[in-house]
Amino acid sequence: MQYNDGFRSNLIGTPDQVAERIIGLKEAGADLILLGFLHFQEEVEYFGKHVLPRVRAIEARKKQTLAAE
């Protein structure tokens, strides 16, 4: 595998943008996303605090919308 700074997956941007793109990948059929972090400890912590909660919130909203229909 060649390191590509995450640009091919387009997972760059604000936490909201990255979360939306992760949801888009999931909706397209992805069930696994391989991530690479240059400064692993700091960036994984940031990802866990700022991106993952947004992904979970989007998923919860979508689930509620589907249940309401």
Image (cartoon, rainbow, N blue to C red):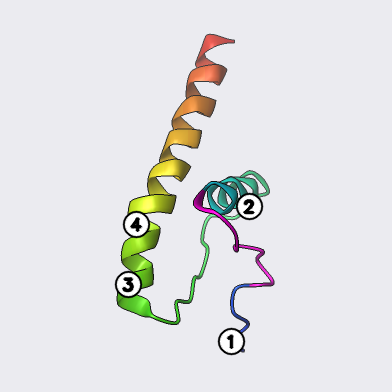
Please name the residue shown 42% across and 40% down the image.
56
Crowd band around label 2 with a 10 angstrom C-alpha radius: few (<14), some (14–19), many (20+): some
Residue marked by disc 2: 25
Q: Nearer the viewer, mark 3 or mark 4?
A: 3
Marks 3/2: CA–CA distance: 24 Å
Residue marked by disc 1: 3
Q: Is residue 13 left or right of residue 32?
A: right
In the image, the segment drawn in magenta is: 7-15
Instruction: Name the chief secondary structure element in magenta.
Output: loop
Q: Earlier in the sequence, mark 1 or mark 3?
A: 1
Locate the C terminus by quadrant.
top right
Q: Position of residue 8 (x, y in %)?
A: 69, 71
Q: Earlier in the sequence, mark 2 or mark 1?
A: 1
Residue marked by disc 4: 48
Marks 1/4: CA–CA distance: 22 Å
Residue 37 picture quarter:
bottom left
Q: Are marks 1 and 4 in contact (CB under 8 Å)?
A: no
Residue marked by disc 3: 42
Q: Nearer the viewer, mark 3 or mark 2?
A: 3
Q: Is residue 53 left or right of residue 18?
A: left
Q: Please name the amino acid that badge 2 sits on.
A: Leu
Marks 2/4: CA–CA distance: 18 Å
Marks 3/4: CA–CA distance: 10 Å
Locate the N terminus by quadrant.
bottom right
Callout 1: helix, strand or loop?
loop
